[in-house]
Image: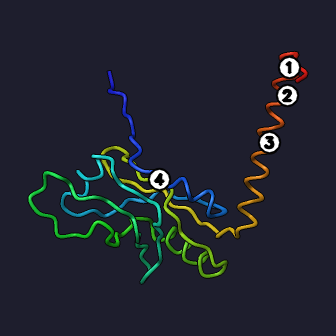
Amino acid sequence: MKKAEVDPVVARNRKAAHEYQLGESWEAGIVLQGMEVKGLRAGRASLVGGFAIVEDREIWLHGVHIPQYSQARWFDGGSRRKRKLLLHRAQIDKIERKVNESELTIVPLTLYFKDGRAKVEIALGRGKKNWDKRHALAEREAGREVERAVSRRLKGRTD
């Protein structure tokens, strides 16, 4: 009997959907050093403020906070150092082409473990303006109000 595998999510970037119009996404491996894996397994990482850029045909993740493992004797890497992402060459070329043509940003969405390896889900995003954010919030609120009205109507209430 095979053991059920649970892929625990270490961190989510919930602000990304608010700050960006998200497009195509990819799953990438992440190169970690020393005790960073144990720090991730402790579950205290943060993707807020993180982004990725393409340098020399490689994708590097910047601004992601992976805290130092508390029981490590020493750790020379910074908690917000840049980390290399592992993708196929064709995927990197496609991402680079889209970023250069359309002025998009590479945004990390989720950091998780899959089959014992740390993975990060990245997506292409276009930054929203303030009025876009307000408009999306108003649409969401209107949708909620419609659902409440339908629910009240189905229950026979007219208040």
Of residue 53 and residue 1, the one placed in the foreground of this image is 53
In 3D space, how far apart are the residues under numbered discs 4 and 3 (Cα atoms)?
A: 26 Å
Which disc number belongs to residue 110? 4
Identify which residue is drawn at 13% across, 55% down: 72
Residue 18 position, x and y percent, is 63, 58
- Residue 143's label in the rendered image is 3
Q: Which residue is mark 2?
A: 150
Q: Give the amino acid type for the residue marked by disc 2 in the picture.
A: Val
For badge 3, the amino acid type reads Gly
Residue 55 disc label:
none
Seen from this angle, which residue lies furthest left? 73
Picture coordinates of residue 127, whole percent (x, y): 64, 70
Real-space Cα distance between discs 2 and 4? 34 Å
Closer to us: 109 or 14: 14
Reading the chain from its start, which is encountered first: label 3 or label 1? 3
How far apart are labels 2 and 1 at the CA level? Answer: 6 Å
125 and 140: which is toward the camera: 140
Q: Which residue is nearer to you in this view: 64 or 154?
A: 154
- Whether pointer 1 and pointer 4 mark residues with C-beta atoms closer than 8 Å, the reply is no
Q: Amino acid at mark 1?
A: Leu
Q: CA distance from mark 3 to mark 1?
A: 17 Å
The residue drawn where x is 81% and y is 25% is 151
Quadrant into which the N terminus falls: top left
